[in-house]
Amino acid sequence: MSQQTSYPPPPQQPMAPQQPRNGLGTTGFVLGLVGLVFSPIPFIGVIAWPLVILGLIFSVIGLARVNKGIASNKGLSITGIAASAIGLIVCIVWVFVFNSAVNEIQEEVAKTAKVDYEVTGDAANVELMYGEVLEPKEETTPTLPWTKQVENKGVFKGGILTASADENGGTVTCKITVDGAVVSTQTATGPFATVNCTGT
């Protein structure tokens, strides 16, 4: 009867340690940093919204993976969270600033201002153009002084005032007053003397 020879089992190869997977934390850092760079730029900053939100999400997941021991980029994940959070705050501040500016402009446009147009001098047969920028009115006055009071709305409440003398010339002075404050005045002398006042 033959005797069986038993061999010892082959030694087990040690398992290679699992490489840390740092992709999410790194992605969150990059997105957060890019979003932070774009966030303070007017109009272009709208693209920062998705960047900082995704950056915050990926960085938080990356930090959670570090805490579980399956990632090793703790510093990068924390930096990504900070950059994303700051970028998000900047985006939110821009929304409030933009809304405030829009409301202020709307209120200003809706206001009505008392506007006085005045032309003085010694010229005769002066051609006049006055009123709102987009809808000016025309008139001719044989003698000066000439005045007109209107109520204007819009951004350029003072409108425009143009006065032109004929070939005989003379002195012409225009003046625009908005709610009691002089906003524009100009004087010209000579044949075909022309003055242009613009009130804002």
Image (cartoon, helix red, strand yellow):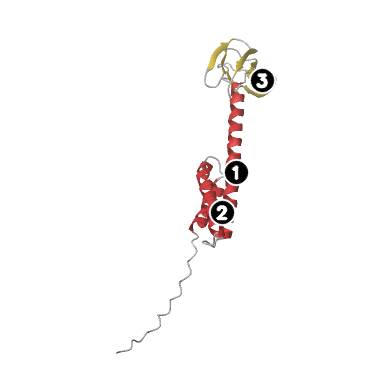
In this orientation, which residue lies closer to the viewer: 50 or 94? 50
Residue linked to disc 3: 177
13 to 182, vertically: above or below: below
For the point 57% across and 42% down, which residue is it?
91
Residue located beneath label 1 in the image: 90
Mark 3 nearby-residue class (10 Å; few <14, some 14–19, many ≥20): many
Could you say where residue 9 lies in the image, as x and y percent from the top left?
40, 80
Q: Nearer the viewer, residue 134 or 44?
A: 44
Amino acid residing under circle 1: Val
The local secondary structure at tag 2 comes to helix
Q: Looking at the rendering, in which quadrant would you find the N terminus?
A: bottom left
Q: What amino acid does circle 2 point to?
A: Gly
Q: Residues within 10 Å of mark 2 (few under 14, many from 20)?
A: many
Q: Tag 3 or tag 2, which sits nearer the N-term? A: 2
Helix, strand or loop for disc 3? strand
Up/down of 15 relative to 185, above or below: below
| Cα distance in 3D space between marks 1 and 2 | 15 Å
